[in-house]
Image (cartoon, rainbow, N blue to C red):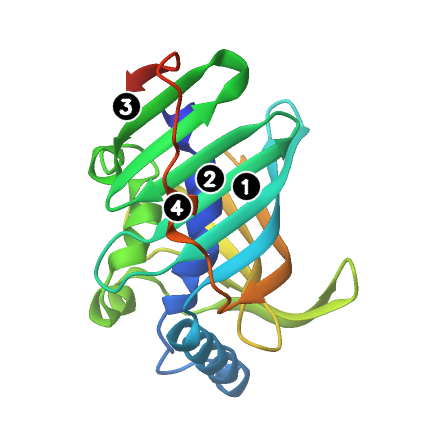
Amino acid sequence: MKKLIFPTLVAALILIAVAAAPVPKTNAQAGMVSSIYTRMLRNQQSLKTLSADIGMEKYNAQLREPDNYYGTVRYIPVAGRTAFVRLEWNKPQHEILAVANGAYVLYRPRLNMAYVGTTNSIHSQKDSDVLALMNMSATQLRTRFGEPQDVREEILWGGVWTQHLTVTPKSAASYKYIEVWVDKEGMPVQTKMVEKNDDSTTVRLSNVAKNQTIPMDQFTLKLDSSVKRVKG
């Protein structure tokens, strides 16, 4: 099941989840880190909706080969609850993930099949702690990560100016660390999650549009009765 839902669900959520990371009390680059987190917090507080193109690279460290995916994402945050998410991959194959009211549907048209379940059911998976970041309080977040590392300015392809930082979980987690690239407006436009076996998932947002109207029917998939449904 992990191969079906993750990294697809992580790709849709991790860029927003990391934006809630707390400002550290002390740091060798405290001024820069404080500025980054202040912008991220303002972005999170002002973000009502998000639409963007999305690219994802899944790198297999053992085979030393990447798999690349391209599509679009629609996102509406909901305080204290699972966000509304629509992630539609167009390349290399067409797939749609819709998350609404704590339930998900992953539709694979080429197989005429849909995987359905609740986000709570994913919490038992290896990557559950990443998904859990979406609903953590500020106090919980303060205990999750150590001090940011490798803080620097970096220009991404396309000429996008960002500030880069790395956060490492203080307690046991399914991954080693997460790298985040934050633009001038405080939006995490790229993340890289590195797992314990050195596999990694890099997610990039482009053509970002914030706070535009997104019809709620985007988060409900109307599937034909012929579609086979498999519970997750």
- Give whichever of 92, 154 is nearer the camera: 92
Q: CA distance from mark 1 to mark 2?
A: 8 Å
With respect to residue 178, does 160 lie above or below? Answer: below
Residue 7 seen in the figure:
no
Residue 154 seen in the figure:
yes
N-term mark: 1 or 3? 1
Q: Which residue is mark 2?
A: 195
At 20% from the left edge and 39% from the top edge, which residue is drawn? 120
- CB under 8 Å between discs 1 and 3: no
Query: Picture quarter containing residue 21?
Result: bottom left
Q: Position of residue 152 (x, y in %)?
A: 64, 72
Q: CA distance from mark 1 to mark 3?
A: 22 Å
Q: CA distance from mark 2 to mark 4?
A: 35 Å
Q: CA distance from mark 4 to mark 3?
A: 23 Å
Q: Which mark is residue 232?
A: 3
Instruction: Report crowding for label 2: few under 14, some 14 to 19, many 20 or more residues within 10 A (C-alpha).
Output: some
Q: In which quadrant of the rendered image does the C terminus lie?
A: top left
- CB under 8 Å between discs 4 and 3: no
Instruction: Report crowding for label 1: few under 14, some 14 to 19, many 20 or more residues within 10 A (C-alpha).
Output: many
Describe the element under mark 4 as helix, strand or loop: helix
Q: Is residue 72 left or right of residue 113?
A: right
N-term mark: 1 or 4? 1
- CB under 8 Å between discs 1 and 2: yes
Q: Which residue is mark 4?
A: 217
Amino acid type assigned to the residue bearing label 4 in the image: Asp
At 62% from the left edge and 25% from the top edge, which residue is drawn? 93
N-term mark: 1 or 2? 2
Q: Which residue is mark 1?
A: 201
Q: Which mark is residue 25?
A: none
